[in-house]
Amino acid sequence: MEKKRIELYTPKYYYTCAIAGVLACGLTHTFVTPLDLVKCRRQVDAKLYKGNFDGWSKIYRAEGFRGLYTGWGPTFIGYSFQGAAKYGFYELFKKKYSDLVGEETAHKYRTTVYLAASASAEVLADIALCPWEALKVRMQTSTVPFAKTTFEGFNKIKSQEGLSGFYKGLTPLWGRQVPYTMMKFASFERTVEFIYASLGKPKQDYNKLEQLGVSFLGGYIAGVFCAIVSHPADTLVSKLNNVKKAEGESTLALSLRLTKELGFTGMWRGLGTRVIMIGTLTALQWLIYDYVKVATGLPTTGSSGGQEKK
């Protein structure tokens, strides 16, 4: 008996997209933890390491292989939650906004639809991510080891700072992630569209493997743009989660103070590392996401129209 295909825009479709998002974001962010670790530490202290290899070498000598994956626990949990919401709600909002304005208008202004849908999805996704991002950064950047395990670290923040300790970086996180995700989805959709147009044949004329290759390439190109757009806010998030507020100081006041202290050069510190990390990360995310969709009988993302070639 032939396996029943998942119908587009049904609850099962959105559920499948959310599961694909868990795998795409949770696995990839955990995989690049060593890159993220050195990047975060250099953002907080520029003199700590000369570069990535120097950082990895020093961490490995001091803490062994396990030290290179400091913070992997909250990374996996947080970005799994975020991935589910990011991709699941993106597909939902893209459909809702397209229906709202009508098919013709949605196609004509499709970039605007991509931007609006991705921004809406990311606002919700970051609420799920923020507590785990706060813990990850604290574990990765504290001079004295903050906690040995994710559970210990979570309880430590909860007991010392309460809920505000988990969410004091939410606004800067939105400042980093919302532009990042808007660029990630809109540039990916339009890049994939451009690639198929350049190849000269519609998407459905290519087999699954070829379509996944386009997803990977489009993802890497989108990732480079993402890294550039979101980097200053990423630096600020790293600093915010590693610096205590002065008595009576608001998160906004602390953010402004840190921005002034960092200066223009400081805000862009670690960009090269992040371009490599985010480019690779985004390419792998789109590859995994579309692989799961293809494996469940759904078409790959982008350049709408037609099912994959059998």
Image (cartoon, rainbow, N blue to C red):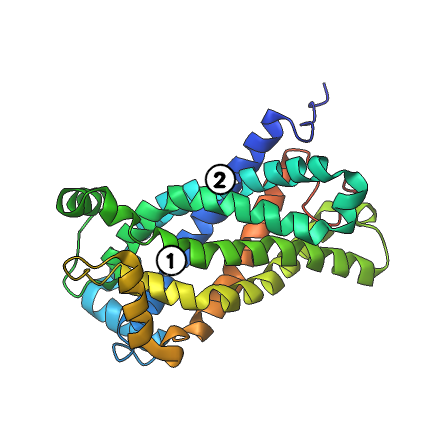
Q: Residue at x 52, y 36 (%)?
A: 18
- Image quarter of the N terminus: top right
In the displayed structure, 27 sits above or below 295; it is: below
Q: Amino acid at mark 2?
A: Ala
Q: Residue at x 70, y 27 (%)?
A: 5
In the displayed structure, 48 sits above or below 297; it is: below
Percent position (x, y) of residue 253? 28, 63
Report the front residue among 194 and 94: 94
The reply, left or right, for residue 10 in relation to residue 269 is right
The reply, left or right, for residue 105 in relation to residue 276 is right
Percent position (x, y) of residue 57? 29, 73
Inspect this view and state whether residue 299 appears: yes
* Residue at numbered disc 2: 85
Query: Which of the labelled discs sits on residue 296, or is there none?
Result: none
- Image quarter of the C terminus: top right
Inspect this view and state whether residue 66 appears: no
Report the front residue among 155 and 117: 117
The reply, left or right, for residue 206 in relation to residue 218 is right
Percent position (x, y) of residue 218? 65, 59
Tag 1, which secondary structure?
A: helix
Q: Residue at x 68, y 36 (%)?
A: 298
